[in-house]
Amino acid sequence: MPKLLIAVVHAQDAGQLVEALRGADMRVTEVLSRGGFLQARNAMLYIGVENDEVDEAMHLIEENCKSHTESVTAEPMGVFGEGNWMPAEVTHGGATVFVVPLDEIRRI
C-alpha cells in the first residue's frame, strides 16, 4: 500500500533534503510555511512513496534534518515579572513526519 509522507522540516534543511530525495528517485513537492513557537520558516514536503520505500525516505529525512539552537529574547512567564523566565536559547528543528496510507498513487 503506498504512503504519503508529510514532513515538516526547518527551511534551513529543506534544500539538501529535497536534493537527497530526488537523488533517490523519489518525487517531492515543497511548500514553504511558518509555524511553531518561534514562528520559524519551515517547509512542508509531500513525498509519495511505495510501501517498500518508506524506510529509505525516513533514513534520508533523519540524515538531512538536524535540530538547531537559536537565541531568543528572555521574557518573564507569569504576571508582571513573577515566576520563571523563558530560556534564552531554544532548540528546534529536526523533522516531524506524518505517514498517511493511500489507496493508490496516480501520476498524470
Image (tube, rainbow, N blue to C red):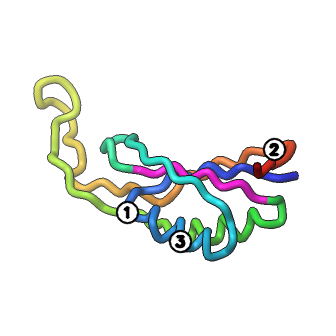
Which residue is nearer to you in this view: 102 or 89?
102
Q: Residue at x 83, y 59 (%)?
A: 51
Q: Earlier in the sequence, mark 2 or mark 3?
A: 3
Residue under label 2: 102
Q: Residue furthest front?
A: 108
Residue 83, image quadrant: top left
Figure check: 85 above or below 47:
above
Question: Which residue in the protein does label 1 denote?
Answer: 12
Q: Position of residue 95 (x, y in %)?
A: 52, 57
Mark nearer the N terminus (1 vs 3)? 1
Left or right for 15, reference 49: left
Which span is picked out in magenta?
42-49
| Type of amino acid at the residue the image marks with label 1 | Gln
Q: How far is disc 1 from disc 2 in space, using C-alphas?
A: 29 Å
Q: Residue at x 23, y 43 (%)?
A: 86
Q: Is residue 44 magenta?
A: yes
- According to the picture, the residue beneath numbered tag 3 turns out to be 19
| Label 2 SS | loop
Instruction: Count neighbours of disc 3 (C-alpha within 10 A) and say few if under 14, some if 14 to 19, many if 20 or more.
Output: some
Picture quarter containing residue 21?
Answer: bottom right
Q: Name above or below for residue 75 compared with residue 15.
A: above
Which amino acid, by three-letter code, is at mark 3? Glu
